[in-house]
Image (tube, grey):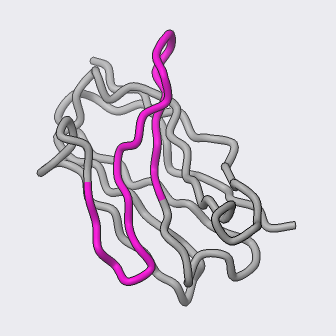
């Protein structure tokens, strides 16, 4: 059973930076797209950043220019580097690999809390 494990969250002041990691057990990353999502209290989960198997990326408008998604397939890890953090970035961040189009499962990690506050 493949698993995704997020880490790197924490409390940071506005304007600060964090780097989140999403590590996969098993080789489920290298051939598939990966997404980072976030969910703030009382709000729906939203896609923050996405990276294809080939390394192409796209971002939500709210994080463009501040967040960078990257992947290291040799380490089965996807990263989300977050700079110039704002209080509205506060949320639980999740990574996702959706293999349902290929008859597999929709994998989610347990999430990592990011809190931006002074």
Q: Name the image quarter holding the N terminus.
A: bottom right
Pinpoint residue 111: horizontal percent, then vertical percent.
61, 41
On screen, residue 117 above or below 108: above
Left/right placement of residue 83 relative to residue 48 reads left
- Residue placed farthest to the bottom in the image? 74
- Residue at 38% over, 25% down: 90
Query: Is 37 colored magenta in this rendering?
Result: yes
Pinpoint residue 2: horizontal percent, then vertical percent.
79, 67
Q: Quadrant of residue 79?
A: bottom left
> Is 116 in front, or is 32?
32
> Is 77 in front, or is 9?
77
Pinpoint residue 83: horizontal percent, then vertical percent.
21, 47
Q: Quadrant of residue 75?
A: bottom right
- Residue placed farthest to the right in the image? 1
> Is 102 in front, or is 113?
102
Q: Which residues, given as a range, are shown in magenta?
A: 35-58
Left/right placement of residue 53 relative to residue 17 reads right
Query: Is 22 colored magenta in this rendering?
Result: no
Q: Quadrant of residue 55?
A: bottom left
On screen, residue 2 above or below 64: below
- Residue at 55% over, 44% down: 94
Left/right placement of residue 27 relative to residue 55 reads right
- Residue at 29% over, 49% down: 82
- The number of numbered badges drawn on the structure is 0
Q: Name the image quarter holding the C terminus.
A: top left
- Residue placed farthest to the left in the image? 65
Left/right placement of residue 115 relative to residue 15 reads right
On screen, residue 46 above or below 67: above
Pinpoint residue 42: horizontal percent, then vertical percent.
50, 10
- Residue at 32% over, 19% down: 117
């Amino acid at each position: 059973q493949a698993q995704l494990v997020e880490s790197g969250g924490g409390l940071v002041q506005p304007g600060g930076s964090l780097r989140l990691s999403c590590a996969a057990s098993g080789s489920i990353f290298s051939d598939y797209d990966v997404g980072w999502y976030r969910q703030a209290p009382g709000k729906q989960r939203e896609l923050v950043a996405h990276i294809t198997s080939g390394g192409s990326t796209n971002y939500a408008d709210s994080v463009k220019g501040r967040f960078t998604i990257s992947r290291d397939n040799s380490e089965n890890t996807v990263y989300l580097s977050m700079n110039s953090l704002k209080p509205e970035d506060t949320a639980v961040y999740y990574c996702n690999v959706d293999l349902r189009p290929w008859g597999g499962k929709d994998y989610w990690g347990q999430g990592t809390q990011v809190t931006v506050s002074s």
